[in-house]
Amino acid sequence: MVKIFVVDDDPFLGNLIKTALEKMDNVEVTHFLTPDECLNNLNQNPDIVTIDYLLPGMNGEELLEKIKNYNDAIQCIMVSGQEKIDVVLNTYKKGAVDYIIKNEGAIVNIENAVKNACKNVHLKKEVETLQDQILDRNKYTNILGNSAAVLKTLKMIQKVEKSGIMVLVTGQSGTGKELVAKAIHYNSPRGRKPFVTVNMGAIPEDLIESELFGHEKGAFTDARDKRLGKFEEANEGSIFLDEIGEMDLLMQTKLLRVLQEKEVTRIGSNKAIKLDVRVIAATNRNLATEVKEGRFREDLFYRLQGFLIHLPPLFERGDDVILLSKSFLSEFCKENRIPQIALSKECQKFLTDYKWPGNVRELKAVIERAAVMCENNEIKPEDIVFVN
Ligand SMILES: Nc1ncnc2c1ncn2[C@@H]1O[C@H](COP(=O)(O)OP(=O)(O)OP(=O)(O)O)[C@@H](O)[C@H]1O
Ligand SMILES: [Mg+2]
């Protein structure tokens, strides 16, 4: 349903527009005679407003400004007898999507303008639905576990999500570091802004700087075009520096500068760009040891430690193994549209006793393989094959 407001102090013309627009499918049209009436009803969240230019109390331009201030997403269409180019330009500058001159063809033009605006409204709603789906998929409710360690982690995520504080997530491979990083971002006020991942271990050393900070055209031999760095891409959102322990000392120095100054300079440029980026880093190395052995800068370590979330290995999480196994199993059966598979009692003991070197990721792979191999909808110990 698209909600449309028509503001026109001429009762006859206002009604004419309203009647014309009401012929469209799935719309609800309300006519207001004064700007104040319209403003007082903005809390009904109209999607589109058509605004007459000459109105009692304030002109259409002022009303447009007030509506855009209230909610910039509202699509405003100006309807006016004014043909002066500066008036027209001004309303566009203030965010109107269309400008209709009041003449014989006005009603048809208004209908077309509203139809166009409807497309924008639908697109916006679609984007919002998709964003909501992404947000839902990454909420911390997806981090499963009842063990003290996991509950503590969830509490910490809730503490840091509202602040912009830098976070370091540590833990062995497969313990859920990326899952936690995403939960922090998508639960934070930045949740609808970009989440940009950079894997420090996967980029060749000589490309890291341009990858992170970008470069200008011609900055080096291969720089044929200007390129934005990941930090710029992540502006207003979060950057996830995965495997930060793999970064070499020179890059660590450059990163530290960016963190302190909150600005980046593209390679080949001398202009610094101010940024607002939340940094979340992760590593499976013990950074304190790396510092002691001279491979990691101590000052950067302390800065990243701003808030440390350590994820314990899976075998220290007790019954979480069973909880996770059952959840992965239901997910697998649902995805493959097969009847629910059970986990036999012997199996449960078997799984909790194992050390899980590959942690949750390994457990997931093992359970999915067992689900394929098992017979009579039940997983038995012989269906379990450890990969490590
Ligand atoms: N507590 C959890 N609840 C549900 N799923 C989890 C949990 N922890 C991890 N997983 C799942 O396990 C897999 C591995 O998690 P993730 O990629 O976050 O680990 P990681 O610590 O980043 O590993 P690596 O160091 O190897 O990159 C993912 O499929 C993730 O969804
Ligand atoms: Mg990871």
Image (cartoon, helix red, strand yellow):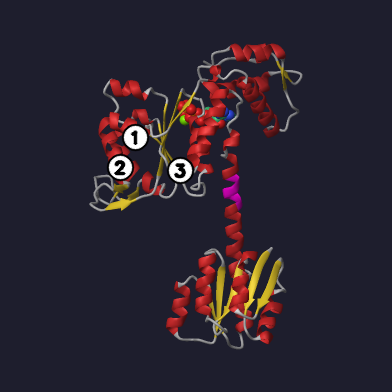
**Tag 1: amino acid:** Arg
**What is the crowding at mark 1: few (fewer than 14 residues within 10 Å), some, or many (at least 20)?**
some
The label number, if any, that marks residue 260 in the structure image: 2
Label 2 residue SS: helix
| Position of residue 176 measured from the top left corner of the image (x, y, whole percent) | 51, 29
Give the quarter of the image for residue 325.
top right
Quarter of the N terminus within the rendering: bottom right
CA distance separating discs 3 and 1: 16 Å
**Tag 3: amino acid:** Ser
Give the quarter of the image for residue 19.
bottom right
The residue nearer to you, when weighing 234 against 275, is 275
| Position of residue 184 measured from the top left corner of the image (x, y, whole percent) | 50, 39
- 131 part of magenta stretch: yes
CA distance separating discs 3 and 2: 17 Å
Q: Is residue 44 left or right of residue 245?
A: right
- 41 part of magenta stretch: no
| Position of residue 65 measured from the top left corner of the image (x, y, whole percent) | 50, 72
Circle 3 is placed at which residue position?
A: 163
The residue nearer to you, when weighing 338 against 348, is 348
| Position of residue 243 measured from the top left corner of the image (x, y, whole percent) | 40, 30
**Tag 2: amino acid:** Gln
Label 3 residue SS: loop
Residue at image position (44%, 72%) is 93
The residue nearer to you, when weighing 257 against 110, is 257
Residue 69 in sight: yes
Magenta highlight range: 129-134
Residue at image position (60%, 83%) is 106
Q: Main secondary structure of the magenta part?
A: helix
**What is the crowding at mark 2: few (fewer than 14 residues within 10 Å), some, or many (at least 20)?**
few
